[in-house]
Amino acid sequence: MSDKAKKADAGCVDRTILDKVGDEAAFREAVRAWLADAMARRHELDADGAASFYDSQQWWMAERNKIGLGTPHWPKAYGGDDLSLKYQVIVAEEGAKARAPALNIFIVSLNHVPHTLMAWGSEEQKTRYLPGVANGVVWCQGFSEPNAGSDLASLRTRAERRGDHYVINGQKIWSSFSMYADYCILLARTDTEAPKHRGISYFLMDMKAPGVEVRPIRQPNGEAEFAELFLTDVKIPVEDLVGEENQGWAIAQSTLAAERGVLAFENGERLRYIMEDFYASAVAREAKWLREPHLHREYVRLFGEMQACRRMLRRLLRENETGSPAAASTVVHVKVINTTLWRKVSDFMLKTQGLSGRFFHEPALGLARDPIDYYITSFGGTIAGGSNEIMRNIISERVLGMPRA
């Protein structure tokens, strides 16, 4: 999509849906009707097979932006509409129910960047960077490094101040969709003498700056959603330092906290419909596993776990909204439980399909992705956003009060 087309979409917002805020039932019905129409048009787009993943994602963001649902929960000053949490939940619920595409390449743009800049960014940074997201600007995250994943504070990427800019040298890894990104939120060490948590700074980096090299990483499922970033003498203007120098570790906690809100809730809702679609397909095909009592019981047990997890996610949203101190402990529980559940569900789908489930392109199952794809991808969820092993340590030490080993 051209920049001109993006600007045209941004300037022609139909407020029909947003004007129904105040009447939850009317708002939900309007969102549902719009989604039905949008999904019909999306199927037409997919039918010709010409749209790339990037183009499809940009199309979906543009469609949402036309009706004010690009970044509706942001403050009006930065292109949003101050949409409250209850209405954000309605949009997430109805989007999952309609099997609408997730805005995967915009996860960092829509969640991590605003969550960070609203709390720590300068007014110039907020007005410069936030409005562009609804117009298709993609951000990626440059945190993890080959030897600084679970122990992020051990990162070695260096930022050296030289006059009115910083010079960055180092390497990042597991940066989701960075091959499509326009900008990057970056952690780099600015003080090598300070304790490791206190010598890190937080930057906003132009991905088109000289010295930025992106190398996609091919995954076992054949896709390349992640990439390595190699940074060689990359210049970042001083005005793109977020907060104070060496304050990056505290700022990064705000970034990582963005995953505990509506994003986590929407993922839980999507799992519900994946499980329902899988079961409906099995009934329609008279799948053999339905006649195996132990497999039927296993599915029902997993479905019950999924419903329990959905309730925990809703509780988490309420706690975050009210500022409850329990929210921090709840998020680590939910992260471990939800990602482990995805692993178990994908494993179940794979084994009940027999040999055919080990291959890609199985449209007869009526799923958005193949069981083998869900299975392979599910392993990454237990690592991303803090590995489950680290999360269990946090639960043990900070929630249960157990001593460090």
Image: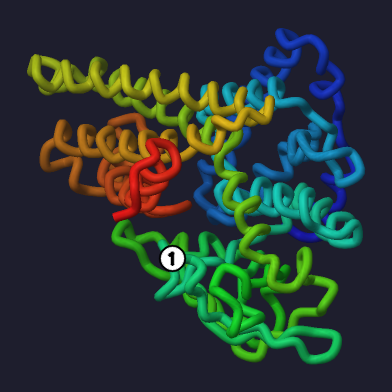
Total numbered circles: 1
Residue 56 location, x and y as percent?
59, 49
Q: Is residue 283 visible?
A: yes
Q: Residue at x 77, y 47 (%)?
A: 134
Residue 354 location, x and y as percent?
12, 37
Q: Is residue 112 left or right of residue 352?
A: right
* Quadrant where the image shows the N terminus: bottom right
Q: Is residue 109 left or right of residue 271?
A: right
Q: In this figure, which colouring scheme has been used for the structure?
A: rainbow
- Examine the rendered structure and indicate whether residue 73 appears above or below residue 26: below
Quadrant of the rendered image containing residue 40 = top right
Q: Is residue 16 left or right of residue 392?
A: right
* Quadrant where the image shows the C terminus: bottom left
Asked whether 102 or 89 is in front, the reply is 89
- Examine the rendered structure and indicate whether residue 403 appears above or below residue 271: below
Q: Which residue is mark 1?
A: 151
Asked whether 390 or 217 is in front, the reply is 390
Quadrant of the rendered image containing residue 198 = bottom right
- Examine the rendered structure and indicate whether residue 393 appears above or below residue 161: above
Q: Residue at x 62, y 58 (%)?
A: 252
Asked whether 97 or 114 is in front, the reply is 114
Q: Secondary structure at mark 1?
A: loop
Asked whether 47 or 63 is in front, the reply is 63
